[in-house]
Amino acid sequence: MRVALCLPVLLVLAGHSQSRRGTAVSPARSAVSQRTRLSKAENGVNGELELVQDSRLTPALRDRLWGGGESAMDDSIFKTVPLRNAELRLVRWDGLPVESEPLERPLAKLESTRLYGGSRETYLLTVDYSAGLGAYSGPATFLLEVVGGMINWLQATQTVNGRKERITLARTLKSAWGIVEAPGTAQKEILQAFCRPSLDSGEFTSTFIRYSFDGENWVRADRIQKGCADLEDGLPDRSLFP
């Protein structure tokens, strides 16, 4: 009796899984698009950090879609079977998953940098939040490290209120950021600037942020001024930052 009740449902689902020509539509699948080796000595685990994306996203297609928003994905194949969102995975050398982080968009990139003047690697995970036209949407970059065999998202303590928050770096027409040399040290610091209108008055203000490492923690210092800084060509002069 249960089988009989389920048959109409199965027939409806089967009908929806076919295209207009009557051919079946394959479900979207995921594949590892980027991977970086991890070691027990440096990261607390022998394994890999993997970026997993929809298997239909070839390197050329990712480059073409990057920064275009949903309008760039207006393709019949993606309308029928939407792109899967990307995922960041930490796996052991034998493929056993340790940790995963589902991302909110299909397009992402994984890069690495050295912020502390030594061999310690910091990973930059950039997720494309572009929405086509608009001055405030674009890629967002999150910083992470693999410590003790686990993913550690870098956070910074605000000097004003002592609150900790994940470091998030936006790059849009009204936002810019960069990693620069910290004066007098072998370390790096992160500068970010953005321009936003006030919700109350509608007047524009520019915020200049400096992230610096004090030997134990990342610290965030802000400076705000009236008006909208020109950020289309990248970061403004260093003297504008705290």
Image: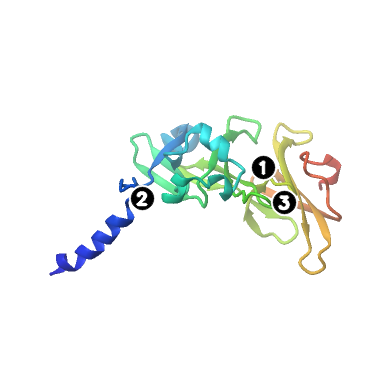
Q: Amino acid at mark 3?
A: Ala
Q: Which amino acid type is shown beneath numbered disc 1?
A: Gly
- Under circle 3, the secondary element is loop
Q: Is residue 42 left or right of residue 81?
A: right
**How busy is the neighbourhood of tag 3: few (under 14 within 10 Å), some, or many (20 plus)?**
some
Instruction: Determine the residue located farthest toward the left in the rendered image.
Output: 1
Q: Is residue 210 visible?
A: no
Question: Quadrant of residue 171 in the image?
Answer: top right
Label 2 amino acid? Arg
Residue 120, above or below 205: above
Reading the image, the residue beneath label 3 is 135
Q: Nearer the viewer, mark 1 or mark 3?
A: 3
Describe the colour scheme in one phrase: rainbow
Indicate the position of residue 67 as horizontal and vertical percent values: 62, 43
Instruction: Report the front residue among 201 and 75.
Output: 75
Per the image, the residue denoted by label 2 is 20
Residue depicted at 42% across the width and 50% down the height: 80
Secondary structure, mark 1, is loop
Earlier sequence position, callout 1 versus callout 3: 3
Q: Secondary structure at mark 2?
A: loop
Residue 144 lies, in percent from the top left, at 56, 43
Q: Position of residue 155 (x, y in %)?
A: 62, 51
Residue under label 1: 215
The residue lying at 78 percent from left, 33 percent from top is 184
